[in-house]
Amino acid sequence: MTEHIIRLLNRHLSGYEVRTVERLGEGQDNAVYEVNGELVIRQSKAEAPDERREAVEREAALLMVVSDLSPLPVPRPMFVDEEAGVFAYRKLPGRPLKFHPVKEPACLAAPLGDFLSRLHTAPVERMEAFVPRDIYPLSELREEAEGHYRDIVAQVPPTARRQIEKFLAAESPPDPDQETLTFCHNDLGSEHLLVDVEASALTGVIDWTDAAIADPAYDLALVFRDLGPEIYERTLAHYEGSHDDTGHERAVFYARCALLEDIAYGLRTGIRPYADAGLAHLGHTFA
């Protein structure tokens, strides 16, 4: 992969000297590399060339729009190589919140609320030129959550099993109607929030692969899952979108499903930080 990255940079940034290449991480859709501590290379994991091309073209075009929309820094592409399924951007400052907790998490609530307000109130007709609609029945999410739970139950502390099983036995909330859907990051886990740890400040939002016209309660759900109910409530105090009791019900539902999925993903792939963080958050997510 190092040689592949060197060839790409020679093609697009003539004269750029590659001194170091470090693998930053890997999700379900992309592998990410850092070059010289200053550039980030995102490589699509799609197997079909057409899928790779479509993925990087869409995300690069979206980032150009989002960089003007977001009050927080987001990646802005330096170049896109559709054939290779790659795009590059200058590294944003900060570290992923999931792996680098801040001293004062309450300080994140106001900028998170402002960020989500800007996203969720963006004109849908404009943003759907760049992203698909992501509409998934909540009953199917619950069924998937049941499967994830079966896969991880041996790792779940006995004290948490009763709450999880009670949740899985209950009916799903009603699906959101079409008028509720907004432009969403749609994968706003704490691994995609960059922070200055000492200052307890947000420095950027990364990984827009799953951005969609979707239920805004899902973005808020991942705040609930990863930062807890107190920061979720503080974020809502700065949130200008629509979020009523039914939205809260869906947010908690999504948070619980997403937590089980994260634990299952971490155990299945061996990426333990996902599993460990998920297990640590069982208490407040299923309280």
Image (spheres, rainbow, N blue to C red):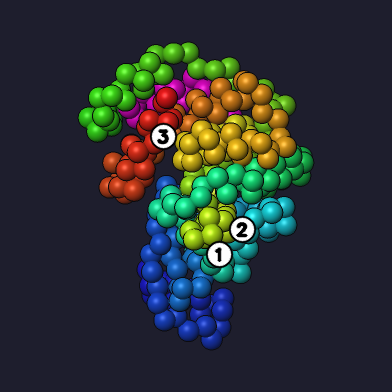
Q: Position of residue 36 (x, y in %)?
A: 45, 76
The foreground one among 111 and 69 is 111
* Residue under pointer 1: 92
Check disc 3 and report its element: helix, strand or loop: helix
Asked whether residue 146 is drawn in magenta, I would say yes
Q: Residue at x 34, y 48 (%)?
A: 273
Q: Residue at x 63, y 63 (%)?
A: 76
Which region of the structure is painted magenta?
133-149
* Residue under pointer 3: 259
The foreground one among 115 and 45 is 115
Q: Residue at x 55, y 29 (%)?
A: 251
* Residue under pointer 2: 74
Q: Are marks 1 and 2 in contact (CB under 8 Å)?
A: yes
Whichever of callouts 3 and 2 sits on the residue coming sooner in the sequence is: 2
Q: Position of residue 56 (x, y in %)?
A: 56, 56
Type of amino acid at the residue the image marks with label 3: Leu
The foreground one among 119 and 4 is 119
The residue furthest front is 104
Q: Is residue 44 left or right of residue 60?
A: left
